[in-house]
Image (cartoon, rainbow, N blue to C red):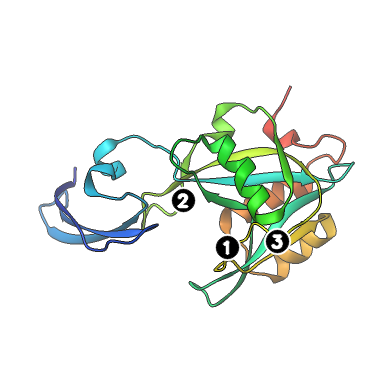
Amino acid sequence: MSKIEKVTKTTDNRFLNMYDLDTVTKTGHKALYHVASRAKDVSELKLNTHINKPDGVIIYALYGEKRDRVVLIRQYRFSIGDYIYEFPAGLVDEGENYHQAGVRELREETGLTFHPIKVDEMYSRPYFTTIGMTDESCAAVYGTADGMLSRDGLEDGEEIEVVLADRAEIRRILKEENVSLMCAYMMMHFLYEDPEKPFGFLNMK
């Protein structure tokens, strides 16, 4: 099995840092590997803790009396120099669980009030996002949203448009727009689930 001989932190930023890993492959070849992480120091890296604590939360929220629209955001991202469709999401703050983070983040990004539903842990527990580049993992929360849209909670660096998308708009977005992978998969679930059974893809009983 390959192994890590040394880990060096190379940046000191607030939300994301880079780490250099001196590695040895299973055939004995030495290599340098670069990892981005939310960890503040080497001791907090998941390669050391082996604890998959969620860094962030992704929010799947249905809107409307018939729960026939899904809450999306269209956000400008510097990494692609363009807008992309995503689910509302954000980091889990110190001292809160990811369900609490979901309620807070939806309020901040959209102005809406989130009402989480209880689902089997296998649908909600944290999964890794882009494991070839980062040890970041995100949990998912599911529920309904109501209230009025507001931009009051946005930070200066957030350029976000809230979209309450019905199935026709979901089809258009999937065909024509930039979409994050997690969002695309969940939109496909929404598109083909029974309209009379919201959250049916979660096998709720």
Mark positioned earlier in the residue sequence (2 or 1): 2
Q: Label 2, label 1: how many angstroms apart (C-alpha)?
A: 24 Å
**1 relative position to 177: left or right:** left
Q: Quadrant of residue 196?
A: top right
Q: Nearer the viewer, mark 2 or mark 3?
A: 3
- Residue at the image point whose x is 30% and y is 36% from the top: 50
Q: Nearer the viewer, mark 2 or mark 1?
A: 1
Most distant residue in the bottom direction: 81
Q: Quadrant of residue 100?
A: top right
Q: Label 1, label 3: how many angstroms apart (C-alpha)?
A: 9 Å
- Callout 3, which amino acid? Arg
Q: Quadrant of residue 124?
A: top right
- Callout 1, which amino acid? Glu
Percent across and percent down for residue 139 are: 52, 40
- Residue at the image point whose x is 56% and y is 28% from the top: 121
- Residue at the image point whose x is 64% and y is 41% from the top: 103
* Local SS, label 3: loop
Asked if the residue at tag 3 contacts the one at tag 1, i.e. Cβ–Cβ closer than 8 Å, the answer is: no
Percent across and percent down for residue 44 are: 28, 43
70 and 44: which is toward the camera: 44
**137 relative position to 57: left or right:** left
- Callout 2, which amino acid? Thr
Q: Height in image: 16 above or below 115?
A: below
What residue did someone put label 1 on? 155
Label 3: few (<14), some or many (≥20) within 10 Å? some
What residue did someone put label 2 on? 129
* Local SS, label 1: loop
What residue did someone put label 3 on? 151
Q: Say which quadrant the C terminus sits in.
A: top right
2 and 160: which is toward the camera: 160
**115 relative position to 69: left or right:** left
